[in-house]
C-alpha cells in the first residue's frame, strides 16, 4: 500500500544511520532505485513535470499569437526583460517555440512515454523479475534527469535558452560568435549537452528493453503470445537504437563547428559584407543527420501509444484485438519504412528533385500499415462490450486523433503539394494532431489503465472523464481550424508585416483561448494523478494463501495483473507464472476473459 | 490584482471539482458496495455520439467561415495543377475522414456495455485485412503517380523556355537582395572570395564581367504575366526560404549552395484584384484601410525558414505586370555599376566591349 510505504520511508529517513544495513534505504528505494516499477514512476513524474512546463510555454507564445497587439503586464512580472512592457520579445518568442518543441518531443513523448511504459510493462507483461540490467536502467533514468536539469538550467542563463528552432538547423545554430545570429549563445550549447545526455539515456534504456523482451520471457511466453504493448515497445526501442546515434553524431559535429570553428555544415558565410573563413561544408548534411533521427522519432513517439491503445481498447472492449498478426506486421512495416522517409522534411531545402520523388513514394507507402492499424482498432470496437471508462475513452480518442492527423499526412507527404505547405501552419496542425495530441491520448489511456498497477489505487474516474472531454473538444478546437491557415508560415512572431497572412486574427485568438482551456484541463489530470497516489480509491482484491492481495481490476488477460497488488521487488512472491494462451482470450469459450496464465483444459484447442 | 484573483478563482474551482468528483465516486461505492461503470458507459456513449455531431457541425462551420479567407487561387501554371491535386486529395481524405470517424464514435456508442449483453469473439478475418490493405494501396498509388508527375514537371530543367526571365534573390538577415540582369538579360558573375565580397559589394559581383554592368537591384520583384521566370536563389548568412504563397513557390536559400525555382505567373496583380473583386469576402471593407479588401491586394514574398529573431519581417512586394509595363519599369532602373564605378578599383578597358561578351555568357544562365 502506498500509505504504508510513505510512513515507512519517513521512518527510514529519521533512522537512516542505524538502519544502513537494511536492504532498502530511502536512497536505494526512491532515489537510486534499480526497480523497474520505481524507475517507471520516476520517468512518469519527470515527464508530467515537463509536460506542464512544455504546455505552459505554448500558452505563453499563444498569448503573443492570439493577441499580437495586446500587452499582458503580468508577463513582465514573471519574465522580466523577456517581456518588457508586458509583451513577449521576439527573441523570447523563438526561445519559447524552440523549447516547447524540444521538451514535448523528447522529454515528454519520448522519455516520459517510452520510459514510463517500457519500464513498467515489459517485466510485468513478459513475466520477468526486472529488466535485463537494472543498473543500466537506473542509469537511463539518471541520464534523463541530468538532461532535464541541463535543459531547465538553460532557461535561467542571461542570454536565454536555445531559440533557433527545435530542429537546430545550422548555420543559424552553427556559429557561436556572430552578433546577428540568434539562438547561438550558451543556451544552445546547453541544448546540445542536454540532448547528448538524453540520447545516452535513450540508448541505455532502449538496449535494455530489447534485451529484456528477447531474453527474459517467462516459460510459455513465445513472441506471438506477447501483448501488443510488448511488440510496440520493443520495436520502438529498436528504432531508437538505430536512429539516435545519427543525431548524436550530427550534434557533436555541430558543436565542433561552434566551438572549434570547423566547417562541417558551413560554407561561404557572408555577414555584413564580410566573408567568414568557413569553407566546404553543407547545411543540408545536418538536415540529413537530424531527420534520420527526426522522422523515426515521430514513430518512437507514436508506436508506444499504438501499443498501449491496442491493449487498452481490447481490454475495455472485452473483445480480442482484431487482427493480432496484422497489427504486429504493420508495426514492423512502419519500423522499416520509418528509416527511408526522412527526406520528406527536406523536399524544398535544395535536395535533388529526383530524391524528392523517391521519398514521396516511401512516405505515402507508410500510410498503408497505418491504415491497417486504424481499421483493426475499429474492428476491435465493433460488436464489443465497451466499458467507457477514462482509459477506454482515451483509447477511442486516440484512434479519432490518429485518423484526423494521419490523413493530412497524405497531403504533406506528396512533394508537389509540400512546396506550398512546407513550414506552414498546415504542417503544425498535422503533426500536433497525429503525433502530439494522439500520443498524449495514448499516454493518458495508459496512465488511467495501469495506475492501479503502479500505485494500488485508481485514479478518480469522474475527473478522468472530464479531463477526456476537455482534451478531446479542446484539442480539435485548437488544431482543426488551424488547417485553414494553409500557407501561413509557421514560427512567425506576428503576421502584421504581410497583407497575405494577416486575415486570421480572430481565428488565432480563438485557438489561443482553446489552448489555454486545454492547458487548464491538463491540470485536472495532474491534480487527479497526485491526489490519487495518496487518496485514490483502493484496489480491492482477494487475499490468497500466500498472504498477498491479488486483483485484476479491469478483467485483463495479460500477466501483469497476476502479481500481487503490492509492488514487490521481483514482482511475484513465488515462482513466475507460466503462459499457456495468447493474450486476447476475451469473450470466448463461454467466459468473459481467460488469463494467459490459465492452463489449457484437457482437449481444449489453443487459439490458432 | 485581476490576474491574482483569477488565479485564486481557478485554484478554488479546481478544489471544488476534485471534491465533487471524489464525492461522486464515494457515494457510488457507498450505495452499491462496488464501483460500476455501466451507468457511466451509457452516459459516455451519448456524449461520444454528441461529439461526433459537434465535430461535423464544427468542421462545416469552420469551412464556411474560413475557406473564403484563405490565400486565393494559384497565380502560376504549376500552382493551378498542384491546387487541383490538393483538392482531389482533400476530397479523398474527406471521405475517409467521415467514414472512419463515424465508425469510431458510432461503434463506441452502439456497443458500449449498457447496450449489449456480450462481446462477439471475432479475432481476425484475412479477407477483410486484404481488402483494407489493397484499397488504400490503390488509392495511394494514384496519388503518388499524380504527385510525382507534377513534381518532375516543375523541376524539369530540359523543358525550360529560352525566353525566360532570370532574377536573382539573395537572402540575408533580415532582408532580400533582389538583382535583375538588366536589358541584356544576363546576370553578371559573382565570385565568392575576400577580394570580391566587401561591405559595398555584398554579393561579390565580378565587375570584370561586362554582363554585370547593367544589373540593377530592385525593391519590388517585378514579374511578367505568362513569361516563365527562373529565380536563382542564395543566402548570405543562414538558411532562408524564398516563399511566394500566391504562386505556390517555395525553395530554401542556402549559404554556399545555389538553388533555383522555375515557374510561370499567370495573373497580373490587376488580374488578381479583378478576380477577387468578385469574391464576397474580398468585397468586405478592411477596417485598417477603409477600402474593400481586393483593392489593396498585393502579391508578397515571405521567408519560410526560421532565420533569426526578425524572421517574420522579411517581406517584399511582388508585382506581376504585362511585358510592356515591365519594359517601361526596366527603363526607370539604374544599374549598380553606375553607382559603384568610382569604387571599382581596377576598371578594365573591356568595359566597352560589353556587347561582344553577352553571347559568350549565355551558357552561364542555362547551366
Image: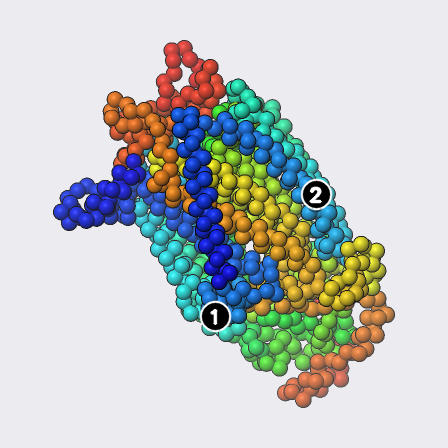
Q: Residues within 10 Å of mark 2 (few under 14, many from 20)?
A: few
A255 relative to A408, above or below: below
Label 1: chain letter: A
Query: Of helix, strand and loop, which one carries label 2?
Result: helix
Label for residue A579?
none
Residue A497 location, quadrant: bottom right
Q: For the point 62% across and 53% down, which residue is it?
A: A510
Write down the chain letter for disc 2: B
Mark 2 near mark 1, Cβ–Cβ under 8 Å? no
The residue depicted at 56 percent of the width and 59 percent of the height is A63
Q: Which residue is mark 2?
A: B60
Q: Would you call the spot at circle 1 few (<14 residues within 10 Å), some (14-19), or many (20 or more)?
A: some
Q: Are marks 2 and 1 on the same chain?
A: no
* Residue marked by disc 1: A81
Front-lying residue, A581 or A113: A113
Viewer-proximal residue among A586 and B356: A586
Q: Residue A233, image x and y in percent?
A: 43, 38
Measured in 3D between alpha carbons, the distance from the residue under mark 2 to the one under mark 1, in whole angstroms, is 43 Å
The residue shown at (71%, 74%) is: B219
Q: Is residue A301 left or right of residue A148?
A: right
**Nearest the eye: A444 or B313:** A444
Observer able to see residue A404: yes
Q: Secondary structure at mark 1?
A: helix
In the rendered structure, the answer to whether residue B225 lies left or right of residue A259 reads: right
For residue A273, above or below residue A283: below
Could one spot residue A395 in this view of the protein? Answer: no
Provide residue A85's location: percent of width, then percent of height. 53, 70
Position in image of residue B208 (x %, y %): 67, 80
Residue at the far top in the pictured view: A603
Amino acid at each position: 500500500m502506498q500509505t504504508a510505504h510513505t510512513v515507512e520511508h519517513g521512518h527510514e529517513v529519521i533512522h537512516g544511520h542505524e538502519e544502513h544495513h537494511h536492504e532498502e534505504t530511502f536512497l536505494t528505494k526512491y532515489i537510486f532505485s534499480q526497480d523497474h516499477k520505481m524507475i517507471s514512476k520516476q520517468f512518469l513524474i519527470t515527464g508530467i513535470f515537463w509536460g506542464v512546463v512544455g504546455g505552459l510555454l505554448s500558452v505563453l507564445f499563444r498569448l503573443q499569437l492570439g493577441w499580437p497587439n495586446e500587452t499582458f503586464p503580468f508577463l513582465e512580472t514573471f519574465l522580466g526583460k523577456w517581456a518588457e512592457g508586458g509583451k513577449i520579445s521576439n527573441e523570447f518568442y523563438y526561445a519559447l517555440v524552440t523549447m516547447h518543441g524540444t521538451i514535448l518531443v523528447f522529454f515528454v513523448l519520448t522519455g516520459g512515454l517510452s520510459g514510463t511504459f517500457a519500464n513498467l510493462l515489459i517485466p510485468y507483461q513478459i513475466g520477468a523479475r526486472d529488466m535485463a540490467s537494472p543498473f543500466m536502467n537506473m542509469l537511463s533514468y539518471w541520464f534523463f534527469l541530468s538532461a532535464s536539469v541541463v535543459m531547465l538550467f538553460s532557461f535561467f542563463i542571461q542570454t536565454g535558452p536555445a531559440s533557433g528552432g527545435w530542429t537546430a538547423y545550422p548555420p543559424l545554430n552553427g556559429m557561436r560568435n556572430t552578433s546577428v545570429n540568434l539562438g547561438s549563445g550558451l543556451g544552445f550549447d546547453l541544448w546540445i549537452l542536454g540532448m547528448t545526455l538524453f540520447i545516452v539515456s535513450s540508448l541505455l534504456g532502449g538496449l535494455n528493453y530489447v534485451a529484456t523482451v528477447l531474453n527474459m520471457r517467462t516459460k510459455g511466453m513465445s513472441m506471438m503470445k506477447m501483448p501488443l504493448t510488448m511488440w510496440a515497445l520493443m520495436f520502438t526501442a529498436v528504432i531508437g537504437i538505430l536512429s539516435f546515434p545519427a543525431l548524436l553524431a550530427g550534434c557533436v559535429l555541430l558543436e565542433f563547428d561552434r566551438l572549434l570553428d570547423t566547417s562541417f555544415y558551413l560554407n561561404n558565410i557572408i555577414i555584413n559584407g564580410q566573408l567568414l573563413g568557413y569553407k566546404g561544408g553543407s547545411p543540408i548534411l545536418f538536415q540529413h543527420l537530424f531527420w534520420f533521427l527526426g522522422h523515426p522519432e515521430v514513430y518512437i513517439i507514436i508506436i508506444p501509444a499504438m501499443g498501449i491503445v491496442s491493449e487498452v481498447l481490447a481490454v475495455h472492449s472485452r473483445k480480442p484485438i482484431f487482427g493480432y498478426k496484422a497489427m504486429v506486421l504493420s508495426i514492423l512495416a512502419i519500423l522499416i519504412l520509418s528509416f527511408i522517409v526522412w527526406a520528406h522534411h527536406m523536399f524544398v531545402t535544395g535536395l535533388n528533385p529526383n530524391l524528392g520523388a523517391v521519398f514521396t513514394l516511401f512516405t505515402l507507402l507508410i500510410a498503408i500499415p497505418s491504415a491497417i492499424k486504424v481499421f483493426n482498432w475499429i474492428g476491435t470496437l465493433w460488436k464489443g462490450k465497451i466499458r467507457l471508462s477514462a482509459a477506454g475513452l482515451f483509447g477511442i480518442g486516440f484512434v479519432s486523433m490518429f485518423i484526423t492527423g494521419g490523413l493530412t499526412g497524405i497531403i504533406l507527404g506528396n512533394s508537389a503539394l509540400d512546396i506550398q505547405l512546407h513550414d506552414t501552419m498546415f504542417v503544425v496542425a498535422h503533426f500536433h494532431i497525429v503525433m502530439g495530441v494522439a500520443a498524449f491520448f495514448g499516454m493518458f489511456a495508459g496512465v488511467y489503465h495501469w495506475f492501479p498497477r503502479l500505485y494500488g489505487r485508481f485514479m478518480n474516474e469522474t475527473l478522468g472523464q472530464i479531463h477526456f472531454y476537455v482534451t478531446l473538444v479542446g484539442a480539435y478546437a485548437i488544431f482543426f481550424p488551424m488547417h485553414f491557415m494553409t500557407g501561413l508560415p509557421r514560427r512567425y512572431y506576428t503576421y502584421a508585416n504581410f497583407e497575405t497572412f494577416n486575415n486570421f486574427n480572430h481565428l488565432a485568438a480563438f485557438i489561443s483561448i482553446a489552448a489555454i482551456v486545454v492547458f487548464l484541463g491538463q491540470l485536472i489530470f495532474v491534480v487527479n494523478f497526485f491526489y490519487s497516489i495518496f487518496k485514490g480509491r483502493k484496489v480491492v482484491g482477494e487475499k490468497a494463501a500466500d498472504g498477498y492481495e491479488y486483483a485484476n481490476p479491469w478483467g485483463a488477460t495479460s500477466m501483469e495483473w497476476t502479481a500481487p497488488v503490492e509492488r514487490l521487488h521481483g514482482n511475484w512472491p513465488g515462482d513466475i507464472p507460466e503462459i499457456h494462451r495468447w493474450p486476447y482470450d476475451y469473450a470466448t469459450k463461454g467466459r468473459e476473459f481467460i488469463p494467459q496464465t490459465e492452463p489449457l483444459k484437457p482437449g481444449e484447442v489453443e487459439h490458432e | 490584482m485581476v490576474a491574482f484573483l483569477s488565479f485564486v478563482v481557478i485554484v478554488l474551482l479546481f478544489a471544488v471539482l476534485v471534491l465533487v468528483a471524489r464525492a461522486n465516486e464515494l457515494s457510488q461505492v457507498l450505495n452499491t458496495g462496488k464501483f460500476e461503470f455501466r451507468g457511466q458507459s451509457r452516459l459516455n456513449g451519448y456524449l461520444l455520439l454528441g461529439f461526433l455531431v459537434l465535430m461535423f457541425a464544427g468542421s462545416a462551420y469552420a469551412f464556411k467561415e474560413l475557406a473564403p479567407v484563405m490565400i486565393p487561387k494559384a497565380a502560376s501554371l504549376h500552382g493551378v495543377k498542384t491546387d487541383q491535386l490538393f483538392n482531389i486529395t482533400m476530397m479523398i481524405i474527406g471521405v475517409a475522414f467521415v467514414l472512419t470517424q463515424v465508425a469510431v464514435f458510432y461503434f463506441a456508442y452502439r456497443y458500449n456495455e449498457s447496450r449489449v449483453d456480450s462481446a462477439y469473439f471475432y479475432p481476425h478475418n484475412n479477407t477483410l485485412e486484404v481488402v483494407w490493405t489493397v484499397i488504400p494501396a490503390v488509392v495511394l498509388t494514384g496519388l503518388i503517380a499524380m504527385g510525382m508527375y507534377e513534381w518532375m514537371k516543375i523541376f524539369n530543367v530540359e523543358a525550360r523556355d529560352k525566353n525566360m526571365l532570370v532574377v536573382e534573390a539573395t537572402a540575408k538577415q533580415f532582408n532580400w537582395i533582389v538583382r535583375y540582369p538588366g536589358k541584356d538579360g544576363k546576370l553578371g558573375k559573382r565570385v565568392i572570395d575576400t577580394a570580391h565580397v566587401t561591405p559595398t559589394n555584398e554579393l561579390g559581383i565580378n565587375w570584370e564581367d561586362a554582363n554585370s554592368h547593367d544589373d540593377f537591384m530592385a525593391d519590388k520583384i517585378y514579374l511578367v504575366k505568362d513569361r516563365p521566370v527562373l529565380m536563382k536563389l542564395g543566402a548570405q548568412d543562414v538558411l532562408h526560404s524564398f516563399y511566394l504563397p500566391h504562386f505556390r513557390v517555395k525553395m530554401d536559400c542556402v549559404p554556399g549552395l545555389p538553388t533555383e525555382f522555375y515557374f510561370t505567373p499567370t495573373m497580373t496583380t490587376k488580374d488578381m484584384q479583378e478576380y477577387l473583386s468578385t469574391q464576397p469576402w474580398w468585397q468586405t471593407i478592411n477596417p485598417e484601410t477603409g477600402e474593400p479588401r481586393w483593392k489593396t491586394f498585393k502579391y508578397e514574398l515571405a521567408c519560410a525558414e526560421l532565420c533569426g529573431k526578425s524572421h517574420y519581417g522579411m517581406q517584399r512586394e511582388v508585382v506581376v505586370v504585362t511585358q510592356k509595363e515591365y519594359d517601361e519599369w526596366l527603363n526607370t532602373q539604374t544599374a549598380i555599376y553606375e553607382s559603384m564605378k568610382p569604387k571599382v578599383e581596377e576598371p578594365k578597358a573591356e568595359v566597352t566591349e560589353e556587347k561582344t561578351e553577352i553571347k559568350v555568357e549565355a551558357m552561364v544562365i542555362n547551366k
